Image: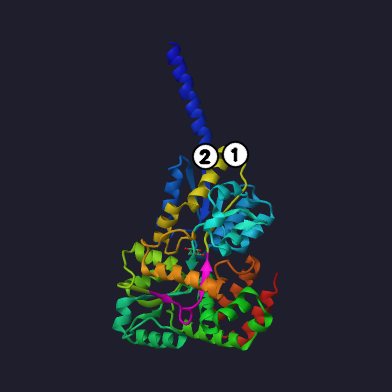
Amino acid sequence: MKFTLNLMAASAALALSLSAQAGEVEVLHWWTSGGEAKAAQGLKASLQAKGHTWKDFAVAGGGGDSAMTVLKSRVVSGNAPAAAQIKGPSIQEWAREGLLQPMDEVAKAENWDGVLPKVVSDIMKYQGHYVAAPVNVHRVNWLWANAEVLKKAGVKAAPANWDEFFVAAEALKKVGVIPLAHGGQSWQDFTVFESVALGVGGADFYRKALVQLDPATLGGPTMDKVLETFRKVKSYTDKNAPGRDWNLATAMVIKGEAGMQLMGDWAKGEFVAAGKVPGKDFICAAAPGTAKSFTFNIDSFALFKLKNKANQQAQRDFASAVMSPSFQELFNLNKGSIPVRTDLKMDKFDDCAKLSNADFLATAKSGSLVPSIAHGMAVPSATEGAIKDVVSQFWNNDTVTVAQTKQRLLSAAKSL
Ligand code: BGC
């Protein structure tokens, strides 16, 4: 009898301690396409392996604009998720409000400072404390192409500059395919714009115009060339582009309905999820004129302050899972990006990822590694939104002139 009672007490204590440890992590993200969802699944699995519950808070919409709107209303109503996909300068904006939870204990124990490039750890810290955990490095300045379609059109290699791009686009048009797959949503217009700006103007121009918002550069003659080229690129998209999601544009390239797409390497996640092989079925190349530069876009999860002890522990375990070598490898194989840790081997990755990795390191040294403005890495979110609107208006309305747009860019840059 005594033994049975002891046993009951022991199992009650065990149940209590397990339930005290097991928490829930609600995660806000916008990874809903095929490749993205597959990648996110790995994160959920690693958290569940630690005994916690994953509460999915997915808000569809490429580029995350809708997710950010929903996040704001949730936080305003005092109901922040444990982790939210927040990037770049926005991390600072949320931290300044006093809403983010420092993760120094985990970061220190796992030596985040030692394994992250400084350009990354600086973004994750607020006043010297880690308040976000990075997942990957996406490169934005990519061009994706259907290998067979290019061959059919007689295009021997991916265009290395914008002149070659237009020659290839003409050739694709002649064989009856849409030269450039595009989804007409403002963040996608902006994604194409930044690659054109980088390819036409180079990394120094890009940095001065789109990171430092230097008025002389924003309003200078190179911007004329950028905008003219950008408008010409649009003439090679199809009339059904408005409103189309980015992954549907990628699917057009996968199916051979379109020849090329200008998009960050989350597009590779779609090719891979469709069973396509780089170098054989599809080609990845730096966007025209950008082979020696790199626009980076780092996905990260900012961690919100929580009250519940078990959930706090689950949140720490989440941060640790995000940075773990095994998760970083698996996630990035599916996501199209590269691990953010510098101590991982790249042998399991394909040639696109290996090129990205080599270029990330090389451009960090050469000074042509620049933050993506279209993906929240370069300027405060309000400024980004204002510039994005100007770019989209120019893309969508042919009566808006280059001169007008330069003026609007200058006012948008001052809109803080
Ligand atoms: C994010 C990617 C995502 C893409 C499309 C980007 O801003 O960084 O993780 O796949 O948007 O939604």
Can you tell me whether the CB of the residue at mark 1 lies under 8 Å from the nearest atom of ligand 1?
Answer: no
**Residue 219 placement: quadrant:** bottom right
Q: Is residue 152 left or right of residue 57?
A: left
The residue at which mark 2 appears reads as: 23
Q: Is residue 309 magenta?
A: no
Q: Is residue 165 visible?
A: yes
Q: Residue at x 48, y 20 (%)?
A: 9
Label 2: how many Cα within 10 Å (few below 14, some 14–19, many 20+):
many
What residue appears at the point 46 percent right and 17 percent down from the top-left corner? Answer: 6
> What colouring method underlies this structural image?
rainbow
Residue 189: where, in percent of width, then height? 52, 75
For the residue labelled by badge 1, is the local secondary structure a helix, a strand or a loop? loop
**Residue 222 at x, y percent in the picture:** 59, 87
In the rendered structure, the answer to whether residue 285 lies left or right of residue 302 reads left
The residue shown at (51%, 45%) is 317
Stretch in magenta: 284-297
Q: Is residue 181 visible?
A: no
**Most distant residue in the top direction:** 1
Q: Is residue 153 above or below residue 267?
A: below
Q: Nearer the viewer, residue 169 or 344?
A: 344
The earlier-in-sequence mark between 2 and 1 is 2
Residue 132, percent across and down? 58, 54
x 57%, y 58%: residue:
86
Q: Which of the numbered marks, if any, corresponds to residue 308? A: 1
Q: What's the distance in space between the residues labelled 2 and 1, CA to CA?
A: 9 Å
Quadrant for the N terminus in the image:
top left
Query: Which amino acid type is marked by label 1?
Result: Asn
Query: Decide: marks 2, 1 in contact (CB < 8 A)?
Result: yes
